[in-house]
Image (tube, grey):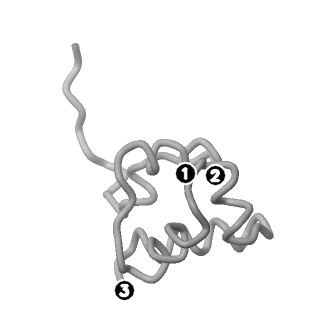
Amino acid sequence: MDIAQIRIKELRQDKDLLQKDVAKECNITPRKVSFIENGTTEPNLEDLRRLCKLFNVSADYILGLPKDLDYPER
């Protein structure tokens, strides 16, 4: 199971939300939420952005990236 699938499901459950609740908030179908959680599909960038906002977490967290990544300064 992919870390993103696990984290999205755990975040949803931690907030006591149903898949249909996440779907409504993220403007996607409940079926797509189910597919994301069971690994049938991956969230596209817009879905990921909406999930991050809904759960108030970074994409790095959902994707399981290390906390100590360096980012270029601009």
Q: Position of residue 43 (x, y in %)?
A: 39, 59
Q: Residues within 10 Å of mark 1 (few under 14, many from 20)?
A: many
Image quarter for residue 45? top left
* Foreground: disc 2 or disc 1: 1
**Against 21, is 51 above or below?**
above
| Residue type at numbered disc 2 | Phe
Q: Residue furthest top?
A: 74
Is residue 1 toward the left or the right of residue 24 in the image?
Answer: left
Is residue 31 toward the left or the right of residue 46 in the image?
Answer: right
- Please name the residue that numbered disc 2 is placed on: 55
| Distance between the alpha carbons at the discs numbered 3 and 1 | 19 Å
Q: Identify the residue shown where x is 23% and y is 19%.
A: 73
- Per the image, label 1 sits on a secondary structure element best described as helix
Going from the N terminus, do you reach mark 3 or mark 1 first?
Answer: 3
- Looking at this view, is 33 or 70 the one in front? 33
Going from the N terminus, do you reach mark 3 or mark 2 first?
Answer: 3
| Residue type at numbered disc 1 | Leu
| Distance between the alpha carbons at the discs numbered 3 and 2 | 20 Å
Is residue 34 toward the left or the right of residue 18 in the image?
Answer: left
**Against 19, is 72 above or below?**
above
Q: Position of residue 52 (x, y in %)?
A: 53, 47
- Please name the residue that numbered disc 1 is placed on: 51
Residues at marks 2 and 1 touching, judged by CB atoms closer than 8 Å? yes
- Per the image, label 3 sits on a secondary structure element best described as loop
| Distance between the alpha carbons at the discs numbered 2 and 1 | 6 Å
- Please name the residue that numbered disc 3 is placed on: 1
Q: Residues within 10 Å of mark 2 (few under 14, many from 20)?
A: some
